[in-house]
Image: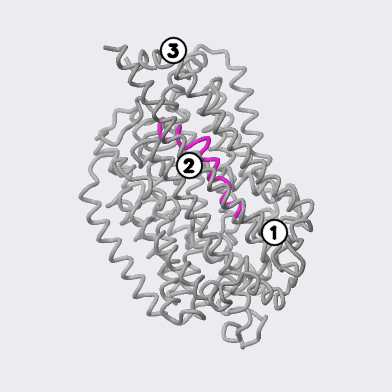
């Protein structure tokens, strides 16, 4: 029975739309996080002095500290962005897909 | 020579708490034997309050724990916010507070880099896993890997690697706990081990996931409040000026102006990348963390859990960074905290005591007592989560699904998981006592390495790759497990430091970069070449699984009991 439901959902063009939209979104965010994080790790490994520069003349605050603090905040903002979009736009679409499959079932 | 060796071994025990072997590089800054301290009555009183409160909750929870769903996942009725706090409580161990503060104190920026590596896995878990975990899983993560594959074989494999991860993690936690409690409370090592083991058994057997969740929530709140308070009091001494703090800290620290430059900790690129991969993907393969995703109502709440959890973790890491930096001046420049009163000598109680000394310096014995109680509570919360994850691998996967082939009654299944919890508790106590004088630093690294190489590849492939078959999953999972263990055993941390051989056979301390590709590659090859009828059926079954993963239709719901 549920296999028939799955069959109908899969056939719904909205399902394809949901999957491609959400996957693209999720992978894009994942790509940003991975690139920034491993870019940072590579800089730590190969060119630590770059991160050790002062942000401004006479300041003790280094570029590395600022970048890392930025990553902490930015990554969290990305999670908030994903949650917001997934919990509203994508979930509404999901609901429609499930309901349409139910209706066909009747 | 002998006492020296012992001292070094004991110094490393504290490090074992930290989730990475590379910490052993932290060297002199974290040295110090865990000798018994004077009994701290403030700490004991506050800890007793915590125990009384959590026991009350356990009693209340035991009345609500009737079905298997209640026991494993608190009936799936935990909200996203509560679960976020509980995940943060599960993830931030005593090492986070003590070890990372000590690391920033000793190594400056390197400690901050570690924290980033601990944090960066969370956004990825959200983007790529959280939703599918919740939509496909019920009680354990092997519900997902075994969804369309051979139940018996795949679950057995997942249970073996889960239990391996849980045991290594438990040893590190127990030994660390014993040393810490000896230090903080002035209790005997064995008494401390028994206290932790027995409290853990009580929480889990009587209160199941409901009690474990609340222990983790309360502990997370205590940790966040205690840390914040210490940070504010300490930072206020510098007028909340980061620039002023840094100017003063760099003036006195042995690293000088290099305090906020990446140092030698991650100098070797291969180790750096391997460590970061292990921490990132290991987090996504830890059974006790994955289990938390099944306690919420739906995918919506699962996503919110990660949002809150990562927010708390990120916030707390930055609090620790400030704590470590202020400690350079407040603790590092005060003769009260050094043996014999020599500044720059050996810290009283060892390197891991930096956070505790800081609490005492800014808030007196009261705050010290509170923070010590927080550290103890933290250990309890982490071991309870581990025990529950281990017990469910035994009862839900091995007993109910493999041995009884899904025919076990709920009452039997719960009874088995309670027995498993008690066994795990005694195993933990036994191993804790057995490993008292051993260097266990490599064990947490091993746990993360196995989680990253054995659990994560099969889990992610089962969710994303249609072509995965039972044969591929088994070969991939077991090869990841075996290679992660082998690489660690042959590396310096075990081959040289534990077995006393001259040179390591495997040159790197972190297995993830090498063991993960082995697992992925073998899973791919053995799935691709699997031409059996069963393999074709498994591949065909992916379509339905995929729709469920995407829509959550048919997912185990909160009203499932």
Q: Give B212 or B132, whichever is nearer the viewer.
A: B132
Question: In this rendering, do the residues under marks 2 and 3 share a single chain?
Answer: no
Name the residue furthest left. B63
- Residue at x 79% of width, y 51% of height: A46
Q: In front of the other: label 2 or label 3?
A: 3
Q: In front of the other: label 2 or label 1?
A: 2
Indicate the position of residue A99 as horizontal and vertical percent values. Answer: 33, 20
Q: Give B371 or B322, whichever is nearer the viewer.
A: B322
Q: Residue A92 carries which label?
A: none
Residue B453 lies, with reference to residue B221, above or below; the image says above
Indicate the position of residue B505 as horizontal and vertical percent values. Answer: 74, 48
Residue marked by disc 3: A11
For numbered disc 2, what is the local secondary structure?
helix
Question: In this rendering, do the residues under marks 2 and 1 share a single chain?
Answer: yes
Residue B148 lies, with reference to residue A12, above or below; the image says below
Name the residue furthest bottom. B340
- Residue at x 58% of width, y 77% of height: B238
Residue marked by disc 2: B162
Q: Does the magenta stretch include residue B129?
A: yes
Residue marked by disc 1: B500
Q: Mark 2 lies on which chain?
A: B
Q: Does the magenta stretch include residue B387?
A: no
Indicate the position of residue B130 as horizontal and vertical percent values. Answer: 46, 37
Q: Mark 1 lies on which chain?
A: B
- Residue at x 49% of width, y 58% of height: B93
Q: In front of the other: label 1 or label 3?
A: 3
Give the main secondary structure of the magenta stretch.
helix
Q: Separation of disc 1 and disc 3 at Cα? A: 63 Å
Per the rendered image, the range of residues in magenta is B116-135
**Structural crowding at the residue carrying mark 2, measured as other residues with C-alpha within 10 Å and reported as few (<14), some (14–19) or many (≥20):** many
């Amino acid at each position: 029975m549920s296999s028939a439901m799955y069959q109908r959902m899969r056939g719904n063009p909205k399902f394809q739309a949901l999957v491609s939209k959400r996957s693209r979104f999720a992978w894009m965010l994942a790509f940003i996080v991975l690139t920034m994080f491993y870019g940072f790790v590579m800089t730590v490994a190969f060119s630590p002095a770059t991160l050790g520069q002062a942000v401004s003349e006479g300041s003790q605050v280094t570029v590395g500290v600022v970048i890392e603090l930025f990553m902490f905040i930015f990554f969290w903002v990305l999670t908030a962005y994903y949650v917001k979009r997934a919990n509203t736009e994508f979930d509404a679409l999901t609901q429609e897909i499930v309901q349409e499959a139910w209706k066909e079932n009747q | 020579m002998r006492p020296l060796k012992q001292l070094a071994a004991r110094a490393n025990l504290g490090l074992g708490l930290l989730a990475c072997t590379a910490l052993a590089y932290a060297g002199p800054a974290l040295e110090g034997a865990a000798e018994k301290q004077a009994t701290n009555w403030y700490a004991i009183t506050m800890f007793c309050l915590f125990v009384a409160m959590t026991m009350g909750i356990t009693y209340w929870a035991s009345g609500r724990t009737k079905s298997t769903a209640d026991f494993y996942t608190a009936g799936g009725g935990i909200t996203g916010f509560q679960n976020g706090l509980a995940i943060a409580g599960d993830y931030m161990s005593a090492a986070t507070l003590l070890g990372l503060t000590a690391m920033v104190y000793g190594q400056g920026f390197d400690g901050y880099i570690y924290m980033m590596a601990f944090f960066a896995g969370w956004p990825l878990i959200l983007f790529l896993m959280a939703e599918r975990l919740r939509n496909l899983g019920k009680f354990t993560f092997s519900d997902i890997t075994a969804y369309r594959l051979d139940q018996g074989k795949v679950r057995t494999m997942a249970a073996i690697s889960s239990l391996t991860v849980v045991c290594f993690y438990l040893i590190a936690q127990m030994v660390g706990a014993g040393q810490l409690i000896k230090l903080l409370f002035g209790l005997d090592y064995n008494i401390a081990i028994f206290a932790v083991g027995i409290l853990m058994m009580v929480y889990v057997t009587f209160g199941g996931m409901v009690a474990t969740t609340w222990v983790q929530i309360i502990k997370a709140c205590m940790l966040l409040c205690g840390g914040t308070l210490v940070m504010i009091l300490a930072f206020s001494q510098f007028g909340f000026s980061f620039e002023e703090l840094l100017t003063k800290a760099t003036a006195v620290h042995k690293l000088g102006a290099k305090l906020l430059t990446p140092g030698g900790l991650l100098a070797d690129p291969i180790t750096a990348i391997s460590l970061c991969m292990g921490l990132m993907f290991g987090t996504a393969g830890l059974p006790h963390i994955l289990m938390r995703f099944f306690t919420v109502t739906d995918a919506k709440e699962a996503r919110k859990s990660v949002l809150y959890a990562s927010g708390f973790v990120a916030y707390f890491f930055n609090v620790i960074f400030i704590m470590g930096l202020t400690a350079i001046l407040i603790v590092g420049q005060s003769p009260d905290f050094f043996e014999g009163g020599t500044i720059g000598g050996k810290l009283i109680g060892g390197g891991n005591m930096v956070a505790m000394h800081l609490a005492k310096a800014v808030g007196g014995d009261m705050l010290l007592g509170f923070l010590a109680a927080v550290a103890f509570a933290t250990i309890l919360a982490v071991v309870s989560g581990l025990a529950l994850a281990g017990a469910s691998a035994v009862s839900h996967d091995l007993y109910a699904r493999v041995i009884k082939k899904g025919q076990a009654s709920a009452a039997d299944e719960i009874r088995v998981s309670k027995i498993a919890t008690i066994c795990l508790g005694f195993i933990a106590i036994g191993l804790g006592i057995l490993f008292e004088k051993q260097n266990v630093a490599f064990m947490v690294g091993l746990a993360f390495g196995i989680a990253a190489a054995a659990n994560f590849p099969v889990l992610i492939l089962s969710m994303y790759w249609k072509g995965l078959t039972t044969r591929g999953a088994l070969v991939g999972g077991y090869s990841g497990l075996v290679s992660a263990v082998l690489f660690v055993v042959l590396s310096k941390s075990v081959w040289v430091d534990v077995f006393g051989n001259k040179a390591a056979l495997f040159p790197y301390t972190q297995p993830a970069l090498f063991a993960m590709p082995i697992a992925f590659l073998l899973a791919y090859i053995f799935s691709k070449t699997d031409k059996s009828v069963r393999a074709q059926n498994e591949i065909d079954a992916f379509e339905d699984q995929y729709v469920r993963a995407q829509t959550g239709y048919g997912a185990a719901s909160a009203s499932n009991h």
